[in-house]
Amino acid sequence: DGGITQSPKYLFRKEGQNVTLSCEQNLNHDAMYWYRQDPGQGLRLIYYSQIVNDFQKGDIAEGYSVSREKKESFPLTVTSAQKNPTAFYLCASSTRIFSNQPQHFGDGTRLSIL
Amino acid sequence: SQQGEEDPQALSIQEGENATMNCSYKTSINNLQWYRQNSGRGLVHLILIRSNEREKHSGRLRVTLDTSKKSSSLLITASRAADTASYFCATLGSNDYKLSFGAGTTVTVRA
């Protein structure tokens, strides 16, 4: 079955620690995205990538970093500079960037502070 | 940036009834999409309607788009318990070409 796999499902971060959230897709999609979801709010775009070795900042990129070394993978690192990291993080992909094609989502990673 | 706003924030209906939720947005769009999210899960795409379309159907779902009023509605007919979820509209802007999500409508279908 094609889809997007996010891991881990739950993650805890200690003070001053960087943590990395994994996102893998086998849909052969060029575009990938990271969103943050807080309670009662819509999704906010952190980073997006149109193609391998290329990525762009979204609306709330501060305190986060990404890489896109492989088409299938788009890991997100939450750095110690992100002072309020507690949220639900969603990874998505689509055939083309921001187009008339829908985005496909993983089942998310819930990040909490220890 | 959050462009779409759903109304109502929450909706509780009896199984078999219809559920209607609305989405309003502020700037011109390329398309508008509706997604469903079950508790603790990712979003699932339901329907995409382009700016030059007025109505689309998919099974028990009907979406309308009024670009003059900058609004859209999602109708779920003959609701089932499995329709209990949060529903989000997302707009693809004509100018910035990013997908902006609203805060969602939480729908509870009572058996």
Image: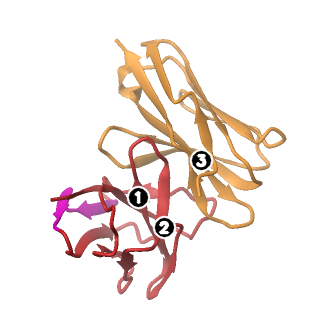
Chain colours: A red, B orange
- Chain letter of mark 3 equals B
Give, as a three-letter code, the residue at label 2: Ile
Horizontal relation, residue A43 to residue B74: left or right: left
Give, as a three-letter code, the residue at label 3: Gln
Residue bearing the label numbered 1: A36
Judging depth in this view, the residue of B61 and A22 nearest the camera is A22
Judging depth in this view, the residue of A18 and B35 nearest the camera is A18
CA gap, disc 2 and disc 3: 22 Å
x 44%, y 57%: residue: A104
Image: magenta residue range? A3-14
CA gap, disc 1 and disc 3: 18 Å
Secondary structure type for disc 1: strand
Query: Which x, y percent locates residue B38?
Result: 35, 38
- Chain letter of mark 1 equals A
Judging depth in this view, the residue of B63 and B95 nearest the camera is B95
x 45%, y 26%: residue: B107
Nearer the observer, disc 1 or disc 3? 1
Secondary structure type for disc 3: strand
Residue bearing the label numbered 3: B33
Determine whether label 1 and label 2 are within 8 Å by CB. yes
Query: Which x, y percent locates residue A56?
Result: 52, 79
The answer to whether B29 is drawn above or below residue B44 in the figure is below
The answer to whether B14 is drawn above or below residue A39 in the figure is above
- Assess disc 3: are there few (<14), some (14-19) or many (≥20) residues with their C-alpha within 10 Å of its C-alpha: many
Residue bearing the label numbered 2: A60
Quarter of the rendering containing residue A72: bottom left
